[in-house]
Amino acid sequence: MNKYSSFKTACAAIALFVSAVPINKAAAQNKDGNASSVTIGMEPFVTKLMSKMTVDEKIGQLNLVVTGNVATGTTMSKGIEDKLKRGEIGGIFGVWGTENILKYQDVAVKNSRLHIPLIFGLDVIHGHETIFPIPLGVSATWDMGLIEQSARTAAKEATAEGLNWVFSPMVDIARDPRWGRISEGSGEDPWYGSQVAKAMVRGYQGKSMTDADAVMACVKHFALYGGAEAGREYNTVDMSLIKMYQDYLPPYKAAVDAGAGSFMSSFNTINGMPATVNKWLLTDLLRKQWGFKGFVVSDYTALNEVTNHGLGDLQTVSALAVKAGLDMDMVGEGFLTTLKKSLKEGKITQQEIDLACRRVLEAKYKLGLFGNPHKSINADREKQDVFNDDTRKFARKIAEHSFVLLKNQGETLPLKKSGTIALVGPLADNHSEMLGTWVIAGDPKKSVSVAEGIKNVVGDNVKVLYAKGSNITDDSLLSIRAFALTGPEQKDKRSPQEMIDEAVEAAKKADVVVAVVGESANMSGESSSRADIDIPESQKDLLKALSKTGKPLVIVLFNGRPLTLTWEDKHAAAILDAWAPGTEAGNAIADVLFGNYNPGGKITATFPRSVGQIPIYYAHKNTGRPFDGTGGAKFKSDYLDISNDPLYPFGYGLSYTTFSYSSVQLDKTDPVGNTTVKATVTVTNTGKYAGEEVVQLYIADPVASISRSVKELKNFKKVFLQPGESKVVSFNITTADLKFYNEKLTYDWEPGKFIVQIGTNSSNVQSASVDWSKR
Ligand code: BGC
């Protein structure tokens, strides 16, 4: 049977189910894949369906299994087909492609008693088949339209391959670059992270989740996973409620407000209570305070791991979880194997199981799966919507927009489209590491290396002398860990010195050296915390040797996190941060190196000078003894051996052109009550290239009932300016921008002085003050 005849059979089975369950008068087959054919409303539909279900079938809906070659834990699901037939599975993740998906969906809708369709999930994080930059890179675009489009494009590809649920966006705020998963989020700022969270949810879920090209978003990891102590993966999180509400929770809340259909609980504890069994988190905050109406799935075996957190055996923690508001259990089968027993023993109630089951069924209803379990299965779409010219074009565009120019001394960049360049570094002619941390369906064979990109963009006009120069790392421990998922690095047979010598020879013959160095894809991401966030030593040795040649050294950096680049900042002529740029890496990098595109990205996570400064973020508190860098430092909040300042502050990023800012003009300086203050600056392109600038608005609240951050980002605008052109950029500031969580956790603003700051990054701003009174 080919996949399309199997599809028809599956639809026929659903039709049977529909007539067997008289509540649904609708036709099951639906060519356009719209669930509107289920004419009955969600609540009565699900109620009626649940009235037919046994306890086992209800518990079955709470079970999410994994299959395929993709596993992010050490446990794999077993006996899937038999479980499907018995109605013991609510969803599957790890497979994609219409053929695979049909195979499983067929079993569920044809061979299980109630023919309930499955939900199919996958970690579609920064693109599906066409890979975009890692989320930290995407966030550096400061372009919500592009960010939304990245999710939309990924949703189209994912649904064309039969998926209907993505484990994204990750909205965890991260202020510790040792944590490898900082790569998967949007950096350190709650307001900015909230904008990205909303854009991603909009992009994934589209106009309606019943549409054939829409997926349900799964917002993760709820909550505060990025606050892991010492940046060590899966570590404890312990923070004050004010910090939580003010700095870490807003992006999750924004995702709820944007209509996200599902959430994933995080691995960590929060003030002693594991998130996965945390009733305050999953019910009181998420549902009661924020009004979330979707379902919550655990992270991979996170429920089983609650036993390691010390809360009891699997039965105990599973009961705790269902009572707390966890609806679906990923891989570990704690729910499947213990909930019925707990029910019999009176440890949980039927209502608690019903509630979780209802939420899972509602998700399937919202996705239109009862109307058509194969709504996205479409042979034409699978051929046309996956990895085509448009997705490639978009990948190139978003990569270019994500790059951040960290240094450009003496206008080293853009490079001339003539002469000789030495292209060196272990990442210069590599096809896989540029894809980044979450690449499940992406194919490295289709990606463009930097060497290829340069050829594509400048052809033979530029002579390229290539030398690998070093391995990514010669550190045996780092090698094992950083390549654990992709297989060991293909090490060069030559000695490190021989490789360096070859690169130096190439450099001597060239006008400029372009060194493509940094982290491998799996040096960041899950389970990839690093205590030392330098460029690996083998590559640093290469850079040092290259720098001694006296040739201008341009560093193109691949990185999943802020790195400590103090040496590089001192010795390189230019540094272009390309993150892990995705499928079109080489073309996008070449476009920027040779000036076809003028970079305008800005970092969304602070780059420290040294690991010792971590956690480091711009919105810190003042302390009682602030050190402003002047005068004697004794008895001030500082370090003996390093400045307080980061190497590159939040919001920082250069351009091939330069911008000047006028002073800030305010239309009122004594506003009263709920009014609007208009703050205006004039931004001028003072250089010789057209370019984009991200104009950032910060507000400081120097006197309040609690100690406040020194400033907070409140808005930004991206402007494009021709050389010599000026634009007036205005922001309307309202009292909503002044609000914060006070000691009683009330979200309100307090009258007094506010400093309005507008500038090119969080450290370089123009300021003006208002005195805002209540009445
Ligand atoms: C990760 C999640 C991911 C899940 C499924 C876990 O290990 O923490 O982010 O969605 O695996 O792959």
Image: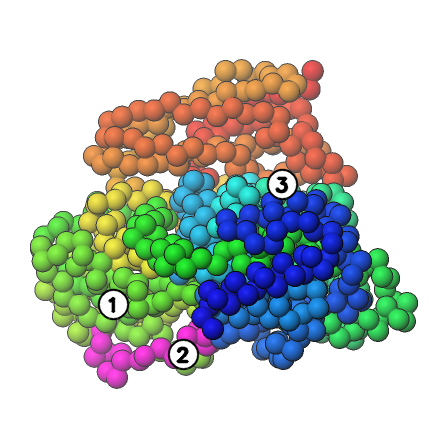
Ligand 1 near label 2 (Cβ, under 8 Å)? no
- Residue type (three-letter) at the residue carrying disc 3: Asp
Q: Which of the two labelled residues, at mark 1 and mark 3, occupies the earlier sequence position?
A: 3
Identify whether 210 is placed above or below 115: above
Which image quadrant is residue 550 in?
bottom left
Instruction: Report the front residue among 612 and 628.
Output: 612
Q: Which residue is tagged 2? A: 487
Instruction: Residue at 77%, 58% (x, y): give it.
Output: 50
Instruction: Residue at 25%, 44% (x, y): give it.
Output: 597
Residue 534 position in % (x across, y down): 40, 64
Q: Which residue is tagged 3? A: 257
Instruction: Residue at 64%, 20% (x, y): give it.
Output: 674
Q: Main secondary structure of the magenta part?
A: loop
- Residue type (three-letter) at the residue carrying disc 1: Asp
* Membership of 122 in magenta stretch: no
Magenta residues, as a range?
A: 481-500
Residue 64 position in % (x across, y down): 64, 67
